[in-house]
């Protein structure tokens, strides 16, 4: 059912009614069944809807119809999705209470609606309040959309490839044969900047996990905890090239831990998230994430604090810098530049 009308409420309502009279339910049932079977988080469910809409009408052929299909399937899946317009742009929003720092949103009836298709418009998107269309709305739409990722979708083993990684620790070279999958970059391509609680808890796919974590555990099993953490810190610091996001991507972008393993270069946010993940998996110690004006790092709680320590809620934490600095920092050391700066604790992890 082609949509060639202007972006107006009457035309959109007509599209919705026509779709509602079609045999759409088996498609929605299949989407929901796959979501349940694969235990998909909302973000990955939305990627599934995007693929479905793209298979029915290419976004490059009829962008408005493609967007309307995504909106329709989100609504029929129980999400409170809304449409807005500005200069004949059709903008898709979904109700979410997540703290997202790089996407436009609007407030309505004490709820936040976050833009889902901002990336499609790029620099042509105007950051101001859009005109909210009189959407089809049903009070039964109870679902908030969450950007939190707690599990990665299953990926085909044959799509993984080997990546050799090596770094030197105390004069000895350690080699790793990682199994990586470029599809991870694709599924996180438009993933927004979420809060640190969500960001620091993004997992790694099973195949990549199995190619790295057992090897790290084997290398550190005879080390004292502090030395083992030092090993993980330097693995994260020196196994990958450093590059600022603004140079790599032209904007701020946070890589998931697995993306940092996949890509050749990464910055401090990415290193902090990967280091946090490794410490959590291997030692499961209390940690805090520390944000300076232009830098993010991690501090770990030991039985005995090393260096000056960071006091947080009555406990001291040792800074463990996983990003290359001007000098080769040891546990408990911070660069002279950051030592003079104000910082804030943006995430606290305490093992259960």
Image: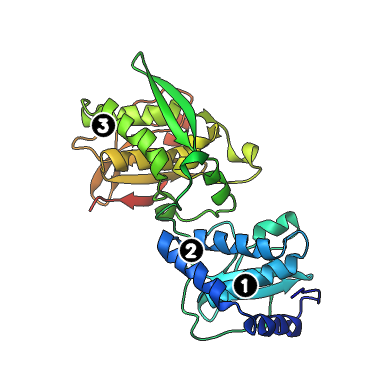
Cα separation between marks 1 and 2: 14 Å
Determine the secondary structure under disc 3. Answer: loop
The furthest residue to the top:
171
Q: Tell me, yes or no, if residue 89 can be seen here.
A: yes
Residue at the disc numbered 3: 306
Cα separation between marks 1 and 3: 53 Å
Q: Indicate left or right for 117 with 233 as reference.
A: right
Above or below, comparing residue 4 to residue 60 in the picture: below
Residue at the disc numbered 2: 42
Q: Say whether disc 1 or disc 2 marks the residue closer to the N-terminus.
A: 2
Q: Residue at coordinates 77% horizontally, 74% vertically from top-left?
A: 3
Q: Residue at coordinates 77% horizontally, 76% vertically from top-left?
A: 7
- Residue 289 is situated, as x and y percent measured from the top left of the image, at 38, 45
Quick one: 30 or 44, which is closer to the camera?
A: 30
Q: Quadrant of the N terminus?
A: bottom right
Nearer to us of marks 1 and 3 is 1
Quick one: 57 or 257, which is closer to the camera?
A: 57
Q: Residue at coordinates 47% horizontally, 75% vertically from top-left?
A: 143
Cα separation between marks 3 and 2: 41 Å
- Residue 11 is situated, as x and y percent measured from the top left of the image, at 76, 82
Residue 57 lies in quadrant: bottom right
Residue at the disc numbered 1: 71
Q: How is the image coloured?
A: rainbow
Q: Tell me, yes or no, if residue 107 can be seen here.
A: no
Above or below, comparing residue 347 to residue 316 in the picture: below
């Amino acid at each position: 059912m082609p949509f060639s009308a202007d972006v107006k409420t009457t035309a959109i309502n007509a599209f919705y009614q026509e779709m509602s009279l079609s045999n759409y339910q088996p498609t929605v049932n299949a989407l929901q069944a796959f979501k349940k079977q694969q235990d998909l988080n909302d973000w990955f469910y939305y990627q599934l809807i995007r693929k479905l809409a793209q298979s029915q009408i290419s976004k490059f052929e009829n962008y408005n119809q493609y967007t309307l299909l995504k909106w329709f399937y989100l609504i029929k899946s129980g999400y409170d999705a809304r449409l807005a317009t500005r200069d004949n742009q059709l903008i898709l929003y979904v109700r979410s209470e997540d703290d997202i720092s790089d996407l436009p949103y609007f407030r309505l009836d004490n709820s936040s609606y976050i833009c889902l298709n901002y990336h499609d418009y790029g620099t042509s998107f105007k950051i101001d309040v859009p005109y909210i269309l009189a959407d089809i709305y049903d009070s039964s739409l109870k679902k908030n959309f969450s950007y939190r990722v707690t599990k990665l979708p299953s990926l085909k083993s044959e799509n993984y490839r080997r990546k050799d990684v090596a770094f030197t620790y105390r004069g000895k070279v350690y080699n790793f044969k990682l199994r990586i999958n470029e599809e991870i970059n694709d599924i996180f391509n438009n993933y927004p900047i979420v809060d640190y609680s969500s960001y620091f808890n993004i997992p790694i796919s099973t195949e990549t996990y199995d190619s790295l974590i057992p090897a790290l555990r084997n290398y550190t099993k005879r080390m004292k905890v502090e030395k083992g953490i030092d090993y993980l810190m330097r693995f994260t610091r020196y196994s990958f090239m450093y590059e600022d996001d603004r140079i790599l991507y032209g904007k701020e972008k946070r890589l998931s831990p697995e993306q940092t393993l996949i890509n050749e270069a990464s910055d401090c946010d990415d290193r902090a998230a990967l280091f946090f993940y490794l410490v959590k998996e291997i030692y499961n110690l209390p940690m805090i994430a520390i944000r300076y004006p232009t830098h993010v790092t991690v501090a770990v709680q030991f039985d005995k604090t090393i260096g000056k320590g960071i006091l947080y809620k009555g406990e001291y934490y040792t800074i463990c810098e996983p990003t290359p600095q001007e000098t080769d920092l040891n546990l408990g050391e911070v660069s002279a530049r950051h030592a003079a700066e104000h910082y804030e604790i943006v995430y606290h992890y305490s093992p259960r």
